[in-house]
Amino acid sequence: MSFSVNQPFRWMDSGTYQESPLEPLIRDEALTASMQHASASPVIHLWVYDQALYLGRRDAKLPYLQQALHQFGVNGFGCVLRSSGGACVPLDAGVLNLACLLPDTTISIDSFFSFVADLLRVGLRDYGTLQFGEVAGSYCAGEYDFSIHGKKIGGMAQRRTRFGSILQLCINVEDRPRGEWMEHFYEIAGLHEMDNHKPIPRIDGSTDGSIASMTNQSATVTDVKERLLASIRTQWPVTPTPFTTEQMLVDESRHHLAQRLRLFAYTAKELAATDWRLPE
């Protein structure tokens, strides 16, 4: 690996978001921008969004995306178009999001995935053995899905910035019908009518699970945060640190994501409005 794991990770929890779904991604971007400082150290950033659809750019090709997002807005979901890879992922208060940020732009994609996979194997070992590999039929299926007993409980995506590398992942902790939500979303959005450039080939809601459902434990996001930290610290240096970012970097990151990368974000209330339309 091209970075030193002997350098302590800062463990930073920015809490639960309920306003614009873009805000936690702005914090990730700002943390990555801070990697330009010579004294920068790796960061593990944890957050929760209650609740929204985190769309991939491929989802923008869905023929009835506007209708689907409006209906989900009526049902209490916001939405955001994210900058990392993959297709739509539903987030709620029972999903823990984690970003691993490195002051390194040279680490290979595979090496970064493999390192974070090792972090997860150790961090979630109290819940069983994780398997890595695509879970066919799951939402946002990919090579770095992770599962327990064959049911997907999360996935990973990464991207590079000028100053660092970021790998974002979500862990389904508490049980929700997320697979069913995604089946319904893609049905409304017209996935079955598409011949080419489908965001996903198909979706089978029964392929998705959660730590709670796969282990028959009453797992909560708070429980998983505590176990992750305790387990990871047995093998890597990790220092819990209050979440802070430079306001200038937050403002610059908000402009970069919204204006330069043209990521859109709406709250459930905005999506539910009768006059809401997707940006052109």
Image (spheres, helix red, strand yellow):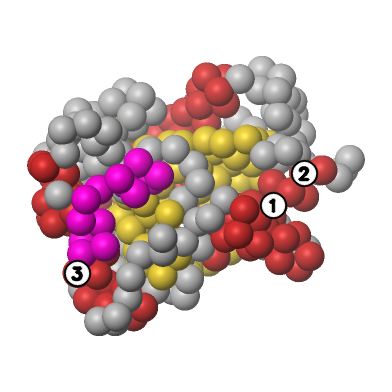
The outermost residue toward the front is: 280
Per the rendered image, the range of residues in magenta is 56-68
Provide residue 240's location: percent of width, then percent of height: 67, 54
Looking at the image, residue 38 lies above or below residue 97: above
Q: Is residue 38 visible?
A: yes
The amino acid type found where label 3 is placed reads Gln
Foreground: 62 or 179?
62
Image-quadrant location for residue 39: top right
Provide residue 5's location: percent of width, then percent of height: 70, 28
Horizontally, residue 245 falls left or right of residue 209, namely right
Q: Earlier in the sequence, mark 2 or mark 3?
A: 2
Residue found at x 51% / y 46%: 83
The amino acid type found where label 2 is placed reads Met
Q: Is residue 148 visible?
A: no
Residue found at x 70% / y 23%: 106
Q: Are marks 2 and 3 in contact (CB under 8 Å)?
A: no
* Main SS category, magenta section: helix
Looking at the image, residue 8 lies above or below residue 89: above
Mark number displayed over residue 71 = 3
Q: Which residue is mark 1?
A: 31
Q: Earlier in the sequence, mark 3 or mark 1?
A: 1
Image-quadrant location for residue 9: top right
Residue found at x 46% / y 61%: 264
Element at label 3: helix
Horizontally, residue 260 falls left or right of residue 149, namely right
Which quarter of the rendering shows the C terminus?
A: bottom left
